[in-house]
Amino acid sequence: MAEKQATNGQSSDPADSFRQLRDNYLDAWAKSMIDVVNTDAYAKATGALLDTCLGVSSPFRETMEKAMLQTLAQLSMPSRADIVSLAERLTNLELKIDDMDAKLDRIEKVFVRPARPAWRPAAARRVTRKGAK
Amino acid sequence: MDACNVVDQVQDLQQRMIQFTKAATTKIRIDQTPRQLVWSLNKTKLYRYRPVFPEEKRHRLPLLLVFALMSRPSILDLRPQNSYVQYMLRQGYDLYLLDWGIPGLEDKNLKFDDYVLEYLTRAIRKLKTFTGVEEFSMLGWCIGAILATSYASLRPDDGLRNLILLTAPLDFSNKEMTFAKWIGEERFDVDGVLDMFGNMPGDMMDYGAKALKPVENYIGNYMKLWDNIENPNVVEAWQAMHTWVTDNIPMAGGAFRQLVVDLYRNNRLLKGEWYLRGERVDVSRIKANLLTVIAEADHITPPCMSRPIVDMVGSKDKELFTIPAGHIGIMVGSGANKVTWPHMDNWLAKRSG
C-alpha cells in the first residue's frame, strides 16, 4: 500500500493508518458492547448494583434527614417538606388563576373590545372584533 | 526523524489537546430564535416563536410542538443553521412550543394524567384563545408523542386537525428491547429509586440512554471531536449537540413510574387498558390526520414501537414515513433539513389551510 501511494505521488501519513486501525477497533468494540448491554446478565448486574446502592445509602439518608429536620426545627427554619407543601399550594392557586383567566378570555371575546397588545396575533384581534359586534 | 521534528510534533499535540479540552468543556448558546411567553402554569411554559411572515402569508392553523419530559426542547432550535423551528417559521407556520420545564420535588407526584389533562389541555385552551383559531396541529416527539397521542385519544373533538408523531414509543409489547430488559420488574426497583430521589434524576436517565451504545457515546463521540478539532463548523455543531445532551433534567416521579410500570412493563396504552384520571385512552378514537415518522436506526425507540399505531387509529388520513436515521439524528442530523423537515412541511402545509 505504501509503495503504491509513493508511486502515485501521494504522501503517506502514518497517522492515517493508525486512525483507520483505531476506527476499525472502535467499530468492533461498539458492536460487541451493544450485544453485551442487551444481555440478561448485564440487566441483572445493573439491577443488583442499583439495589446495593439503594440498600447502602438508605440508612444514611434517613439518619441525615432526621438530623436535618431536628436542626431546622431548632433554628425555626422551614423544612424541605414545608417548602414542597407551600409550592404545591402555589400550583393549586395557579390552576385557579388559570381558570379565571380562561373565563375572562371568554367574557372578553363576547363583550369587550380590548386594548390590544402589539404582539397579539391578528387572528385573535379579528375574532374579538367580530365578537363585539 | 530529527530532534526538532519531534519537538514540533509534541508541541502540535500539546496545542491540539488544549484545543480539544477547551472545545469539549465549552457550552455554547443554543435555542436562539426569538419567542414570547404566552402562558405558564407551574414550570410549564407556552411560547410563541416570532413569525417570519405576516398573517396573510402564513398557514391558518398554528402548530404546537410538544417535546419529551426528560430532555430540553432546545434540540428543536439547536443552531440558527440547524433549527427545525426556524425552518418551519420560514415555511410560514405560526409556531408554538410547550416547554415542560424542570420539575422540582413538589412535582414528584405529577403523572401523565396531569400532563395530558391539566397542563396540555390548558395550554391548548390558551393557544386557541390566543390565536383565535379553533383548530390546530400538534407535533409530539418521543415521550411528547405519548402525551400527544393520549390527548388526541381523550379529546378527539377538541380542534386537533393534524397530529405528527415523531419516534413515538407507543407499543411496548416487545420484551427483547434493551430498555425493557433493564427495567423489568425483578431488575429495576422503580419505587426504591423514586423513594430516594423523588423525581427520576436526569443523570440516571442520561446514563440509561448512553449505555445503549456505550462506545459511541462515551468514546466515539469524543474521537469525532478530536479528529475534527481544526474544523470550526464541525466543532461548533459538536458543541451545540454536546450542550443539549449534557443539559439533563429530571422526570417527575409519578410520570416516570407510569412509564416504567404501565407502559414498558404492561403495555397498557396500546392494549387499551391505560386510564388517565379515570378516562380510558383509546387510540381508535383519534380522528386527526396522522403522520407517524419513524427513524429506522433508532435505538431508543425502535421502529416496532411506533408502527402499530397507524393501523389502530380512527383517522381516515394517515401516513407512515420511515427515515434512515437515529432517534435524535432524525431532526438534527445532516439529512434532517433535506428529508425529515421538508416531508413534514409538505404533509402539514396541505392540511393547514
Image (spheres, coloured by chain):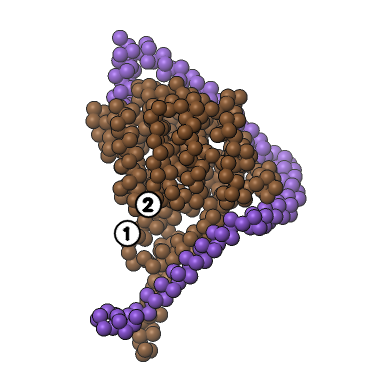
Q: In terms of sequence position, does the residue under pointer 2 or pointer 1 come before the other?
A: 1
Would residue B17 appear left or right of B114 to someone viewing this image?
left
Asked if the residue at tag 1 contacts the one at tag 2, i.e. Cβ–Cβ closer than 8 Å, the answer is no
The image's mark for residue B209 is none
| Residue closest to the far bottom | B2
Is label 2 in a helix, a strand or a loop?
loop
Q: Quadrant of residue A9?
A: bottom left
Tell which of B317 and B121 is nearer to you.
Answer: B317
Q: Which residue was labeled with disc 2?
A: B333
Q: Residue at x 41, y 64 (%)?
A: B224
- Specify whether B186 is left or right of B143: right
Identify the secondary structure beneath mark 1: helix
Q: Which residue is mark 1?
A: B233
Q: Residue B98 vs residue A9: left or right? A: right
Tell which of B299 and A122 is nearer to you. Answer: B299
The residue depicted at 48 percent of the width and 40 percent of the height is B306
Q: Colour of chain B?
A: brown
Residue B87: x and y in percent read 31, 42
Q: Amino acid at mark 2?
A: Gly
Q: Residues within 10 Å of mark 1 (few under 14, many from 20)?
A: few
Q: Which of A103 and A22 lies nearest the eye of the viewer?
A: A22
